[in-house]
Amino acid sequence: MAFHLDRNAYGKQAIRLSKIIRRPDHHEIRHISVNVSLKGDFDTVHTIGDNTKVLPTDTMKNTVYALAKDKFTASIEEFGLHLADHFLSNNPQVSEVDIEITEFSWKRMTIDGAPHPHSFIDGGSEKHEAHIKKNRQQTTLSAGIKDLLILKTTDSGFENYIKDQYTTLKETADRIFSTQCEVSWTYDGLPPNPGQLYNEIRNNLLHTFATHKSLSVQHTLYAMGENALSDFPSIREITLKMPNKHHIPFNLQQFGIDNENEIFIATDEPYGYITGTLTRE
């Protein structure tokens, strides 16, 4: 019986890196995790144990740290492009490089009413992500946000849905809308300043969430994607994942107290999970 090695890749995952950028009057801290994956002419390492075309994954890790000294000076998108170019340019056996970078947030402490020059506090669960896929013909750049926990206390409702013998959910025209949002988008080409563009797209998404009169999670998901595509022609497609972080009104009537949409039970599980991808026609 004959066998054929089909899709295969290898690399180094979870390369954690912190970098201090020392400005004259303050420091910046950048904390990232990098995944590197290579595809190419690697059949013989699998079939006969020939390692002559294998770049060790430990070398990949060391390369990330070494290039971070001079190349990680701006956005994670730009650093990822430098890494992809390096691995592809220096390894003729490689046909495609896949770089994923996640950046964790730190915020400057406010001490005596002013930002402290070198002390920071955890910026929360939100993460900035970048994904670079580069082969000998083209480069694809995607970016996004993960674990963005957002909430609005009104301008959200859910009514006129299907009701059957198992339905207990009550209709409401005014509810808490909270989600731990994940958004990713792919650029049509390589934008000149991806770091600035990321911040502008993020602000656009937040503005839409805050100002949209929501009739469902799906309704707001579509509005967020639609506005991002409309306002940023460089985006080719955008995907949103919006798990519903439920806040259920608590029954105060059992104690003879009116609950005027003020007291809620915050539940983590089970939760609704809504996703959607918008593309240009």
Image (spheres, grey):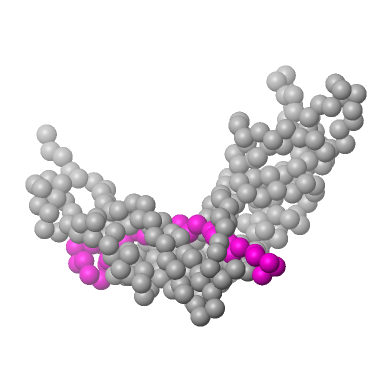
The N terminus - image quarter? top left
At 39% from the left and 60% from the top, the residue drawn is: 17
Q: In which quadrant of the rendered view does residue 269 lie?
A: top right
Our reading of the magenta stretch's main secondary structure is strand
At 56% from the left and 55% from the top, the residue drawn is: 122
Residue 162: give x, y in percent of width and height.
73, 30
The reply to whether the magenta stretch includes residue 92 is yes
Q: Looking at this rendering, what residue extends furthest in the front direction?
A: 112
Q: Is residue 193 visible?
A: yes
At 70% from the left and 20% from the top, the residue drawn is: 166
Residue 12: give x, y in percent of width and height.
30, 53
Residue 178 against residue 35 in the figure, above or below? above
The C terminus - image quarter? bottom right
Q: In which quadrant of the rendered view does residue 160 lie?
A: top right
Q: Name the one closer to the observer, 17 or 82.
A: 17
Magenta residues span 87-114
Is residue 89 toward the left or the right of residue 128 in the image?
left
